[in-house]
Image (cartoon, grey):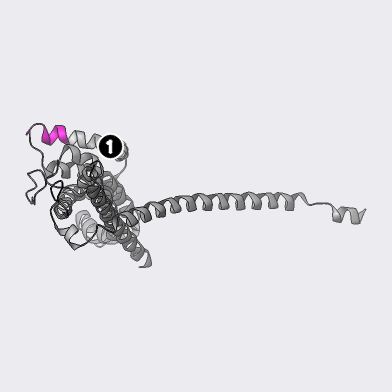
Amino acid sequence: MMAVAENAPRPRSYGLAIRHAISFFGTALTAVCASIGAICLLIILGYVAVQGIGAVNWTFLTSLPAPVGEPGGGIGNGIIGTGITVGLATLLAAPIGLACGLYLALFGRGWFPEAVRFLSDVLSGIPSIAIGLFAYVVLVAPFHHFSAVSAAFAFALLMLPIILRTSEEAVRSVPRTMREAALALGLSEFVTTMRIVVPAARPAIITGLLLSIARVTGETAPLLFTAFGSPLWENNPLNPMAQLPLQVYNYAISPYKSWHQQAWGGALVLILAVLVLNVLARAVLSSRWRR
């Protein structure tokens, strides 16, 4: 009987084997899903690169668009216009987002901060085309004039919730003991925040800022109702201005094969710009954790 008892299966070991099997299956399924997503991304990037690499050269990056039927042309004015518009949007959204993030992180208790967080989450989920329509109603229709300023306003609304939430989390990640030590040494609340808390959270704040810039760099829908586009060199943000995503859109829907090639080239430039911004954001965040 003792031999029979020793050879009997142990329920505890059997249950442990089942848990290990379930864990292995879950890990494998997660890896497969992640691999499918990564493969799809690589296929898209590779296809755009193959289609657009032939159009990308120095002339393409620095020239004005050519009229229909003429060879050549480029996206130089679109690159400049996109840089100006995104720069203006950053100047509009960054101070407001950072200030709101500091407020929520340091004094974010009660119904009002919770309402701000909720509205920020709702704003981040609004489609970009709805933001473009709102900017059109506010800044274009009353003045009967398209402009890069209205496009920057729409982009700023898209950037604001990203900067706000990342700034809040960045400030929250700073140890509370650092703030308490500064206050105990006699520093004011304002000096403690600006000289101690913000520098400690700066890498994560910069990461959120770069991600918000990457978020709007390739947006096209708001530009249809705001910047409108231009075939000329235009540096005045109060006028209609060429935008690279808008040029890619117009080239892609045209019936001309040469414009299709330029659309692929412009798409490749946009993808590379967004990729660089994401790599910079990752590098800044990684350097923060290394320190």
Q: Is residue 72 left or right of residue 113?
A: left
Q: Amino acid at mark 1?
A: Phe
Q: In which quarter of the view is residue 179 placed? A: bottom left
Q: Position of residue 43 (x, y in %)?
A: 41, 53
Q: Which residues are magenta?
A: 136-145
Name the residue at the bottom extreme.
Answer: 291
Q: Position of residue 110 (x, y in %)?
A: 31, 38
Q: In which quarter of the view is residue 202 placed? A: bottom left
Q: Position of residue 284 (x, y in %)?
A: 31, 62
Which residue is rendered at x = 29% and y = 47% of the image?
162
Q: Residues within 10 Å of mark 1 (few under 14, many from 20)?
A: few
> Does the segment drawn in magenta span residue 25?
no
Task: Note whether residue 244 is visible.
Answer: yes
Residues 175 and 158: in front is 158
> Does the segment drawn in magenta span residue 144?
yes
Q: Position of residue 115 (x, y in %)?
A: 30, 36
Q: Is residue 253 above or below residue 287?
A: above
Q: In which quarter of the view is residue 185 placed? A: bottom left
Residues 291 and 220: in front is 220
Task: Note whether residue 184 is visible.
Answer: no
Name the residue at the front extreme.
Answer: 69
For label 1, the SS is helix
Placement of the C terminus among the 4 image quadrants: bottom left
Which residue is rendered at x = 48% and y = 50% of the image?
36
Name the residue at the right extreme.
Answer: 1
Q: Is residue 159 left or right of residue 29?
A: left
Residues 34 and 213: in front is 34
Which residue carries the number 1 mark? 112
Q: How many marks?
A: 1
